[in-house]
Amino acid sequence: MSGGKDSMKISVIIPVFNEEKHIQRTLSALATQDAKKESFEIIVVDNGSSDSTLSIVEQFSSALPLRILSVPNGNISKVRNWGAQAATGETLAFLDADCVPKNTWLREALNVPHDRGIWGAHYAVPADATWVGNLWGKYQAKEEIGAVSFLPAGDMFILREDFLNIGGFNEALDTSEDVELCQRVSKSGLHVSAYPSLAVEHHGTPRTLAQFYRQNRWHGKHVLRKFIANLPSLKSWPIVALSLYTFFMFWASILVPIIAIGIHRWRAALVPPILLLMPFVVIALIKTKRSETIDEAPALTILYATYFLSRAAALTLRAGRNHR
């Protein structure tokens, strides 16, 4: 497919669960789109909100072509799939409640030269982000244009026909469902394409190390499971291997010093913590040296250590309801 027209209808699917903090900003951005109102619809799928989310959404019923669905006991995959099933548009646009698009988002989404499959963008860091979001975004945010292996479901477009044919999001997954969908789309012979001009501001960007840790622990919950399921492919082995290394070295950093102090081998107590931190120091030094910003290496080391500690902790997480 080479581009589109404003007359093509887009169904924007927004899953919500207690999003009173974000949803007004997101819907306000959609209400100011420069696309014709008859060219799109907004489908808000509520996952059992107990705050004022729905009352805020209902305030936009006259400003937007809006429908509200309720899936109170579903995970994020099921919620998005319900929205897709109810959609009347030829194109599906998945947008998260804490993501704010610019006013050209829908029009540009149809006019970029996308191929069949998934297209969209990685998130942009909001203007009020703290050092955590800014630094992680600087070194980890994807800004590729063209073919990529993954796009987040908070800023993703796909033809409804392709989405249904591929089977939608995997409802057995509570997180990383977008990664798994992109993998299936690629395996089917379709494309996954990134266009930075479609980036949305992600106001769910962590502001503190604690938030950064919790978010990445949740997102890492199914990484090992997907890696095993996709064997013999070793595509994600570096993250899995370093997560496992971090898991074992973390516990070694606790247990070995206890034993070492007990037998008066004080220096041995330092070995596991040093080995635990070493990979993160090396990664941070390599990345900051490439960018000629070596002074940021200590802070980046802290972020990488926090990231892989969260991924190590995710190895023990059980499945449960998605409260992202």
Image (tube, rainbow, N blue to C red):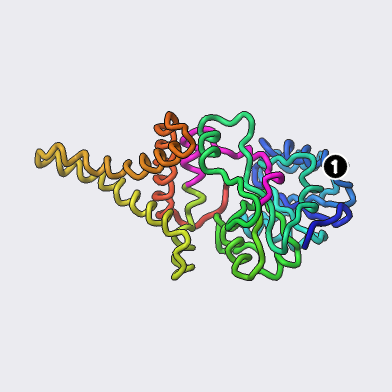
247 horizontally vs 18: left or right: left
The residue lying at 45 percent from left, 40 percent from top is 287
Q: Which residue is mark 1?
A: 34
Residue 84, position as x, y percentages in the image: 73, 60
135 horizontally vs 95: left or right: left
Local secondary structure at mark 1:
loop
Q: Outermost residue, left direction?
A: 263
Residue 214, position as x, y percentages in the image: 48, 42
Which part of the image, by quadrant, shows the N terminus? bottom right
The residue lying at 14 percent from left, 37 percent from top is 266
Nearer to the camera, 217 or 59: 217
The residue lying at 79 percent from left, 40 percent from top is 103
The residue lying at 81 percent from left, 39 percent from top is 59
Based on the picture, tell me whether residue 203 belongs to the magenta stretch: yes
Nearer to the camera, 263 or 240: 240
Residue 112, position as x, y percentages in the image: 76, 52
Q: Which residues are magenta?
A: 194-216
